Image (cartoon, rainbow, N blue to C red):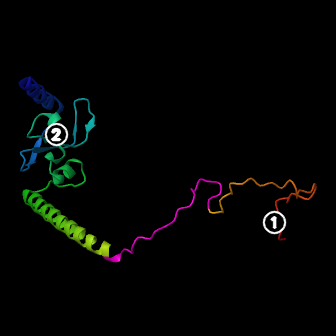
């Protein structure tokens, strides 16, 4: 199957005037190619392509770290020139240094936070919880258990509705 696929690709490149130019190889063994803009056999302009041939040929085995970020940026056209091996190694070293520094900072911060939390926090205060916020009488005096009535003091016509205005006006 693979030799027939290779033969088909070679035949396609010959017919379509597609010429791969090897641009570079990374430390993982991936090969990067550039195909300049060209016109196909029907006269259509085909834009430039940037291709990677993975060292691991199976597409299902692709992982996020399989292509260095510099090459990924070149393939996605966020950078114009392909990266050099020196640039990749320098950036890899820088990433490792940042990883170590951030881990050290995290551990120091963790130790400092344990010490300062105990020093700056006030002692816990005992609160007396009375009722529940969903109760209709929360924050007010609780209703008494004994029933109350206004039956003896009620005067007909003594109550007048307030038209939505307060009484203090």
Query: Does residue 15 show up magenta in the picture?
Result: no
Magenta span: chief secondary structure:
loop
* In contact (CB < 8 Å): disc 2 and disc 1: no
Question: In the picture, residue 119 is in which quadrant?
Answer: bottom left
In reply to whether residue 126 is colored magenta, the answer given is yes
Q: Mark 2 Cα within 10 Å, few/some/many (few <14, many 20+)?
A: few
In the image, residue 145 lies at what x, y percent?
68, 54
Q: Quadrant of residue 148?
A: bottom right
The magenta segment: 119-138
Quarter the C terminus occupies: bottom right
User: Is residue 17 in sight in this rendering?
Assistant: no
- Most distant residue in the right direction: 157
Q: Which mark is in front, 2 or 1?
A: 1
Residue 161 drawn at (x, y percent):
86, 57
Q: Quadrant of residue 156?
A: bottom right
| Label 2 SS | loop
Q: Is residue 82 left or right of residue 115?
A: left
Q: Which residue is mark 1?
A: 166
Outermost residue, front side: 146
* Residue 114 % position (x, y): 26, 70
Which corner quadrant holds the N terminus? top left
Residue occupying the point 9% across, 38% down: 56
Q: Secondary structure at mark 1?
A: loop
The circle on residue 62 is: 2
Q: Residue furthest bottom?
A: 119
Pointer 1: residues within 10 angstroms few (<14), some, or many (20+)? few
Tell me the distance, in whole angstroms, between the alpha carbons under discs 2 and 1.
74 Å
Q: Reply above or below: 60 against 21.
A: above
State the count of labels: 2
Query: Is residue 110 in sight in this rendering?
Result: yes
From the viewer's perspective, tell me whether residue 150 is left or right of residue 56: right
Q: Sequence order check: which comes first, mark 2 or mark 1?
A: 2
């Amino acid at each position: 199957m693979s030799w027939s696929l290779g033969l088909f690709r070679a035949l396609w490149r010959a017919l379509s005037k597609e010429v791969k130019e090897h641009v570079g190889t990374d430390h993982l063994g991936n090969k990067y190619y550039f195909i300049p803009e060209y016109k196909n056999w029907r006269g259509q302009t085909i834009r430039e392509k940037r291709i990677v041939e993975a060292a691991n040929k199976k597409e299902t085995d692709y992982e996020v770290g399989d292509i260095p970020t510099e090459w990924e940026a070149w393939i996605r056209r966020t950078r114009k020139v392909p990266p050099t091996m020196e640039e990749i190694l320098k950036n890899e070293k820088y990433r490792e240094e940042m990883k170590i520094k951030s881990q050290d900072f995290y551990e120091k911060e963790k130790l400092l936070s344990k010490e300062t939390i105990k020093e700056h926090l006030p002692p816990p205060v005992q609160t007396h919880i009375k009722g529940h916020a969903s109760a209709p009488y929360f924050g007010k005096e609780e209703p008494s258990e004994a029933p109350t009535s206004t039956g003896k003091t009620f005067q007909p016509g003594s109550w007048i509705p307030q038209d939505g205005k307060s009484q203090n006006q």
